Image (tube, coloured by chain):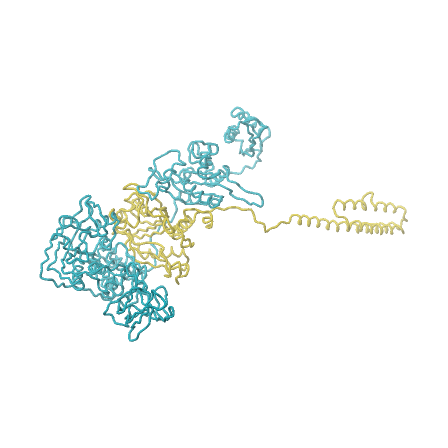
Amino acid sequence: MKVSINWLKDLVDVDVSTEELAQKFNIHSAEVEDFYKLVEASNLVVGYVAKKEKHPNADKLSVCQVDIGGELSQIVCGAPNVEEGQKVIVSLPGAVLPGGFKIKKSTIRDIESNGMICSLSELGIDKKYHNEEGIHVLNDNMTIGNNAVEEMFLNDEVIDFDITPNRADLMSVMGIAYDTAAILGTKLHLKEYKVKEGSEVNPVKIKLDTKNCMSYYARVIKDIEIKDSPRWMQSRLIASGMRPINNVVDITNYVMLETGQPLHAFDYDLLESDTITVRMAKEDELLTTLDEKERKLLASDIVITNDKKSVALGGVMGGMSTEIVPTSKRILLESATFDPYHIRITSSRLDLRSEASTRFERKVDPKRSLLALEMATNLFTEYASGVALKGISKVDNIDYSEVIIELSLEKLNSYLGSSYSLELVIDTLIKLDFEFDVMDNIFTISAPSRRRDILTYQDIIEEIGRIIGYDKLPLTLPKTVSMGKLSERQLFSREIRKVLSGLGLNEVITYSLVNEEKAYDFTKEKTSLIKLAMPMSIDKNVLTHTPINGILDSVKYNLARKNKDIMFYELGKKYEEKGETELLCGALTGDLSSTLWQGRKEVVDFYLVKGILETLFKKVGLGHLEFVPMSDYKNLHPGQSAYIVDRNDTVGFIGKLHPSYENTNDLKDVFVFEIKLEEMLKRRRPLKKAKAINKFPSIYRDIALVVNTEVSSKELSDSIKKSGKRMLASVEVFDLYIGESLGKNKKSIALRLEFSDPSKTLEMNDVDSRIREILGHLGKLHGAQLR
Amino acid sequence: MEVYEKLDQIKLEAEGHIRVVKTLHALNEVKSKYLGKKGSFSEVMKLMKDLPKEDKPHFGQVTNEAKQVILKYIDDQKLLIEEAIVNEQLASETIDVTMPGKKFETGNVHLLTKVREEIEDLFIGMGYEVMEGPEIEIDEYNFEKLNLPKDHPARDMQDTFYITDETLLRTHTSPVQVRTMLDNDEKGPIKIICPGKVYRRDDDDATHSHQFMQIEVLVVDTNTSMADLKGTLLETAKKLFGEKREIRLRPSYFPFTEPSVEVDVSCHNCNGKGCNICKGTGWIEILGAGMVNDNVLEASGYDSKKYQGFALGMGVERIAMLKYGINDIRLFYTNDIRFNKQFK
């Protein structure tokens, strides 16, 4: 909302600079996006083209003798429309035009030129406000030699406000004036209008067939002469960001800008009726709006009709059939109130956001309807030679009862944490121009109709708080005594991040929305996907079933940029109808670490990723989780993937991407994992009691076993543990050998067995016989031979 | 007296020999050549029996002295040799200590996690509990109970990803506040901070992201005031942007709070003098806040005559962008390693 300071000063005393006013609005009222001079130029005067001659050395230039107030000045002009007898804008030498363009005395093709005759664009008036190509021609009544910017009413400043949806009142110069008065403590100059009516009686009848039009006021004005609106009005419209059109349109806009009440003018002769009926549209009813588009209407749209067919989309846009044209003579002027909700759904459905609809959507002050009608009628009389017919047509169903709010001084101060005095609050309410009584420190306030956002005591507190200023509030902290904490799960998440980051992994955060086609890429059970009703693109139309999808996108992004060593993990979610499951996922590829000149590097392979997870598990009390071979995930390598299990329950998986998946996705040697966070959390076995250190020495035995390749190391270890009984303290694989010498489908696994007894030093014989037992079992169960 | 001459001669010869010996092994050989059983001294000692009795003590003394001199030569030389060996070892083991050390790649948490935890920890320190909730929410919790009925114009402010008419991707973490209030059976005081992912129907560009992270704070008690909010905001601003920061509250509008304010922090880059980061104003808008609207309290079963509260909400990306001078929000989600790894 752009507001002309000159206009504002008509309505309220302003005793500070525009900059200061802008700062105060920022702190006390509405956010100021910008403030600026309407025309940023100096040294411009009204000149009179006394003589025009063709430039001797240039076809397209003219040499003008311009009267700039008592003296003739020679100016070379390139505009084709410059003529003798025009009053024009002259920028004298020394003038600075917008963009820092400096005017100097110069010689143009051997002819001296003492300045420039200006166009509107050269004054910084954007093309959207006019369609002039050449220089601007001034009115005949302007005084030669005077400041041209002043004569044009462009010596104005503008504040551009960002108005929040609740402050409908600030969508008008009047509203800004009210808040200015409250902030500065200055006086308002409100205007009243008395219309001089003609003798002819206004015959129009209003019928409201819908409660979504709450009031409808109309006047008929005859003898209208369509022409340009006065220059001062045009300049204020330009300052407000609206393009001047003609006097009828400009007056309706001008009044709307000042009062906040949108008006609409119909060509009364084209209306072909003395009855205006407001009703809801019929389904599929057609109406061509002012923008020449045919609109198909719904029953939720409000239409203005001539009792037969619709002639306007109420509160949103007028219709073509009754548009004001240069030959219009009689107009019907509408000042009505419409239901904000219906205006909003109509304008957003048709993507038709007009100045009128924006105001109706936010609720207008119903008391301004009549004011605006009368103000406009007077302007039509004055600037369009109109004559108002006698009487106002109206139906007004508005409930004008006021909202009465009680607020105690005590509540106010408790709420704000302030200790404002009764006097200060009274003074503030007076500045706000609110009517109120006060008794025993309790205020009874009636909310003014212009502030339809004020409904509760909280709204009143906000008004008082902001006008006094939030900078006056003390700084305290809540008195509520409580213990700050993270839940066990939150602590667990933090610990996982700490461990994995410590092991060299980088956390990523990826998008939860993915392409439907990829959603099941790493899911075995295809539970139903959660789809967006209106996705923005097919690449983000469902919620993912695993963060692996997003992580792999990030992997690809990095590989494309030659970042080839990628160690990613993410704490994300699987989204299903039954709920959200937190997942710890990761994808690794490349080298975990390398010190190249030493020829050392750790390349990511299955065992490296598994080792990272095992380290994590040990660290967080999950050392008992195990890895069992798995081959049923379609996008994982069946020979290099495993379930992560706790006894019989699967809590996650780890695996190399399937070569086919890698090929289609342009990936190579990428390893992924996914573990359910909640399962990890509940399966932890934290150390409860310290274990005593065995003071008797252990005996170590290394054995190498030859088995068929399909026998897993885990099977061997499990059997060894079982037959080693309590004497076996630990078993660890230390070598794997596969070679011709062993025979086909054979491998050799070497294991180190540790034997101990907490109560005595073990005898060699005991160990030897236990080893024999173990070997016997391994032979029977797995066909294992000592190598 | 040729015996004595002979001794002198041996001494001289031995010195010459010992001084050029380079290894311990050779030194031992030289030692036995002169002092061993078949060594030169043994030879000389043999001559003693032919000496007159009275000369024997003197001869013994002289011989012994000569022996000590040679032993001294040997010890000295031994030290020299040992030193040379060590020096040689040192020389052969000398390396270029300026070559790079072994690389240990330490990982890191995501910048958003880092900033999020920083804010969480500040509030935990002030006695807040961290609460989380689902990202798929019902309209009732995301909007209706927050004073945003179905036809409320402010719903336009946050374009929403709907799943069905009644379920959606939450547009803020405020529904966690609703859930916490509803779940509080005693309807007692609340002091919580709610971080999490939220979603808006925005096209991704340098300043918009359809997914982002938000942190909201809620305090409800019988005496919670706007001054408490202001004090809390100042603590937050100082923690995030440095001890010297000041704050400024400007009137604003959110349906769930009344009064509502935008919170500016004095620019950390120019200390409020005005620069391109604060667009010359000296202030940077960092978050929105306000006193909880009574309708919100009542919708979750709190008696608004008894309780009042404040709420504040901030975008973690925005805070991180301001703090670290990041100018494109998409950087948080593309996860370019070169970007992510900077934040250890």
Above-or-below relation of A364 to A526:
below
> Residue B90, percent across and down?
66, 49
> Residue B191, percent across and down?
34, 50
Q: Quadrant of the N terminus of chain A?
A: bottom left
Q: Quadrant of the C terminus of chain A?
A: top right
Between residues A254 and B9, which one lies in front from this camera angle? Answer: A254
Q: Confirm whether residue A481 shows in the render.
A: yes
Q: Is residue A574 left or right of residue A176?
A: right
Above-or-below relation of A395 to A193:
above
Label count reads: 0
Between residues B85 and A387, which one lies in front from this camera angle? Answer: A387
Between residues A97 and B43, which one lies in front from this camera angle? Answer: A97
Q: Quadrant of residue A680?
A: top left
Q: Is residue A546 left or right of residue A183?
A: right
Above-or-below relation of A581 to A57:
above
Tell me what residue is drawn at x 87 percent, y 52 percent. Answer: B5
Q: Residue furthest top?
A: A780
Q: Quadrant of residue A244?
A: bottom left
> Residue B110, percent across and down?
43, 47
Q: Colour of chain B?
A: yellow
Q: Is residue A278 left or right of residue B300?
A: left
> Residue A353, percent across and down?
25, 52
Q: Confirm whether residue A444 shows in the render.
A: no
Q: Colour of chain A?
A: cyan
Between residues A137 and A619, which one lies in front from this camera angle? Answer: A137
